[in-house]
Amino acid sequence: MSESLALNNLDQQWYDRILLATVFVLVAIGMIMVTSSSLYHAENIMDGRTNYFVMRHLMYMTVTLIAVTVVLTQPIIRWQQYGPYLLVLGLVLLVAVLFIGRTVNGSKRWIALGPFTFQVSEAIKLFVVVYLAGYLVRRTDELQTQIKGFAKPLLVLALITGLLLLEPDFGASVVILATSLAMLFLGGARLWQFIGLSAAVGGILGLIAVSQPYRLQRLMTFLDPWSDPFGSGYQLTQSLIAFGRGSIWGQGLGNGLQKLEYLPEGHTDFIFAIFAEEFGLIGVLLVLILFFVFFYRTMIIGRKALLQQRPYSAYLAYGIGFWITFQALINMGVTSGALPTKGLTLPFISYGGNSLIICGMAVALVLRIDYENRLVDKEILSAEASEVQQGDKS
């Protein structure tokens, strides 16, 4: 009886409902906040078309839904097979963007595709996670016993980081390196290797951060934004004002003032500041909890795959969960003044088609892993139920 109930439960739940609901809520918050934060800005720069960014965001959501549907239909083994090819594609695109990319605000990160743009640094995050999960499966013994097993992927990461810094995109480099180190550690790298390399990477990133005048200026601004509130510290001070105005309960949806062209990038990188102004500390805590739940559920799904002897699926789920959550924490840290300014979007919430589509595909991969986990459970339960039935007949 218990076996049949378990099978019926599996038939009814093909995906992790908590994870799915969490992502839906985050996307809904994003849609609401893009609408609230972009109307005035669109009216000023788009000849009165107040709904310009809203309609484009809806279009991006439609494309994301199509991409998610396609990813859900593909078995995870296919991603494992094509992981190295995706990495090569990503490297080619990183080189191509340096020559044919569109320059925006001094950074060459986008390849023009007619009326749309493709941001290579968003795609390469997914490609690295897909590739590295496969590497951890292929080289598990080498990674755990020999230093070269730890060094090989670092050479690839060094190449990717170097190309990203040429754009320049320091924020994406930090996210990719941190995610890769976490995956290597979970894959069985020795503790002393992990600690030593983390310290080395941290030191190198620190040197890179002060190697360029604009990066050093960002660091100095982060330490004391009020020293130049109308110059280099303008964006951060306006963001802090938004947080201060939000207080506990917020000003209410639509009642924020910083989106009235006071805070630059109010609907993209700094949308969380507008959210904090309108929904206050309660809203901020809600988003933090949602991302914690997202991270927790991805870890649970990855752990289950590992227990089922499906390590690639496990490492892929771990990598996606860490990448998206870490990027979200960096964005929230930047907007609240806890971290130096970096050009990173808030996953699922910020305006921007590239981030939304890639993050949607990443979530679809985790849902596909969970679906395959449930298929394995169903096969096991079916076998157990058959044994019980045969035992009853005998």
Image: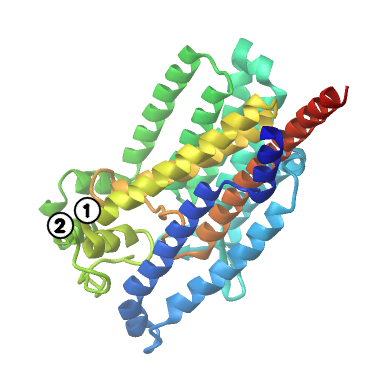
Residue 56's x, y, as percent?
A: 50, 75
The answer to whether 85 appears left or right of 337 in the picture is right
Q: Secondary structure at mark 1?
A: helix
In terms of sequence position, does the residue under pointer 2 or pointer 1 come before the other?
Answer: 2
> Dot 1: few (<14), some (14–19), or many (≥20) neighbours within 10 Å?
some
Left/right placement of residue 153 relative to residue 18 reads right
State the CA–CA distance, disc 2 to disc 1.
Answer: 6 Å
Q: Which residue is mark 1?
A: 281
Q: Callout 1, which amino acid? A: Leu
Q: Residue 272, labelled with which disc?
A: none
321 or 343, nearer to the observer: 321
Q: Is residue 267 visible?
A: yes
Residue 148 coordinates in the image, percent (x, y): 62, 17
Tell me the colour scheme of the image: rainbow
Front-most of residues 208 and 36: 36
Q: Secondary structure at mark 2?
A: loop
Residue 230 location in percent, x, y?
15, 63
Q: Residue at x 45, y 49 (%)?
A: 169
Q: Amino acid at mark 2?
A: Ser
Q: Is residue 34 above or below residue 142?
A: below
Q: Residue at x 58, y 49 (%)?
A: 362
Q: Residue most toward the bottom?
A: 48
The residue most toward the top is 145
Which residue in the structure is indicated by mark 2? 247
Q: Residue at x 58, y 38 (%)?
A: 317
Look at the numbered discs 2 and 1 and tell me whether their residues touch, using CB distance below 8 Å: yes
